[in-house]
Amino acid sequence: MTRYARHLQDVTINNPFPGLPRLEALIGRKIVSRIGSNESMAIEQHTVSRLWGDALYELARLYPDPYATAVRERAATLNGVTAANVVVDAGADSLIALFLRTRVSPGDVVVCTAGSYPTFRYFAEGVGARIVEVPYAETEGVLHNDLPALARAAREHDAALLYLANPDNPTGTFHRADAIDTLQSQLPADCLLLLDEAYIDFCAEGERQGVLPNTARLRTLSKAHGLAGLRVGYAIAPEEWIAKADQIRTQFAVSSVAQAAATAALNDPDCSARLIADTLQLRDQLASALLQRGLQILPSHTNFVAIVYPDAATALAKQKTLLSQGVAVHRPPHPSMQHVLRVTAHPDALQATVLAALCQA
Ligand SMILES: Cc1ncc(COP(=O)(O)O)c(C=O)c1O
């Protein structure tokens, strides 16, 4: 039996506002007059309409579909699953929080890599989890998630959930499908593998269809679809988990604008293909420029490059120099990763002043 957070184990929570698309499906006809939702009437010359046009105003004025049906269906088709295997929320971040809330009770152990994507830890603290961190492994100078050690920690602590970003942030490194399958097979039977694939679209070898056993795969529209400000992501998971997650999800968190844009973006693969190709080209240019200047970088499968400095003080000094020029690069907050700077593959990163500041002694 699936292990849910204790207070959710044997209950079904009903959404009081399942939305008009569900009502239409129930009664078998279109709703032509929505006078039950307490939305505002349309007015002439609304500020949003003047600034961004009537189409955006109309989306902004009305409550969204709480189940983001169009996004679910499109995401399902793209990933070779059914819509019942997909849940949409306000970005991969919200999905991390959602699966933690669904599966973890206060005091339960969650396992992650020390210094990996810190939002996981932030949300895990928020549900009262006990967090067990496993250090990165280092192979020939390359930091990567230590999959056998993560599995060991999950077994040793009977973890409710193991979080893995693949490709990883901030290292940018990636584990292939067979390694992920081995990791999953080594976890306790009721431990959820929360597999954060925010960067998978940048990683040709990452392409993989379907639902993975005991795993929730997280995807985002923020990276390869260029919609970070709109906040849309989705998870692919076993149907039963999706149904449970839907019971506690903030049902209107993904706005009508975000849903419309996400559906359009998922329907336009050429657009994301161009964005990915341009990003990869910039990333390779950035990596070469940094290598030429004698910096140590990690092999990236993402839209950023991680630079490894000899120590935290050096990385901090570079970051401060750049900040004094109004340039923000990221230094991971975790004590074990403060010697790293993470630079996004963006034309600004290739400016001579930025490259100079990153490598000056
Ligand atoms: C590993 C990882 N997961 C999730 C996210 C957040 O994605 P979203 O914008 O969909 O919340 C990021 C953003 O940087 C990330 O690096």
Image (cartoon, rainbow, N blue to C red):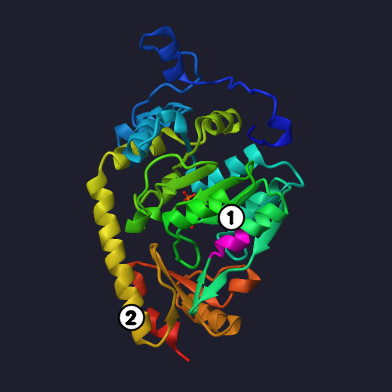
Chain-order first, disc 2 or disc 1? 1
Q: Is residue 149 magenta?
A: yes
Q: What residue is rendered at 42% in x and 44% in y?
A: 230
**Badge 1 element:** helix
Observer-nearest of 231 and 160:
160
Label 1 lies in ligand 1 vicinity (Cβ under 8 Å): yes
Observer-nearest of 328 and 137:
137
Q: What residue is rendered at 56% in x and 65% in y?
A: 146
| Residue 201 appears in the picture as rendered | yes
**Measured along the vertical axis of the image, is residue 220 above or below residue 307?**
above
Q: Specify the quadrant that holds the N terminus.
A: top right
**Badge 2 element:** helix
**Measured along the vertical axis of the image, is residue 142 above or below residue 32?**
below
Q: Quadrant of residue 233?
A: top left
User: From which residue to which does the magenta span run?
Assistant: 145-150
Is residue 323 left or right of 136 when viewed as pictured? left
Q: What residue is rendered at 44% in x and 52% in y?
A: 198
Q: Amino acid at mark 2?
A: Ala
The crowding category of the residue bearing disc 2, from other C-alpha atoms within 10 Å (few below 14, some 14 to 19, many at least 20), is: some
Observer-nearest of 44 and 271:
271
Rendering coords of residue 222 (x, y %)? 41, 50
Observer-nearest of 15 and 74:
74
Give the labeled residue for mark 2.
289
Rendering coords of residue 272 (x, y %)? 28, 50
Q: Is residue 314 magenta?
A: no
Rendering coords of residue 20 (x, y %)? 44, 18
**What distance separates the C-alpha of mark 2 from that of mark 1?**
30 Å
Q: Which disc number belongs to residue 69?
A: none
Give the labeled residue for mark 1.
119
Rendering coords of residue 247 (x, y %)? 59, 28
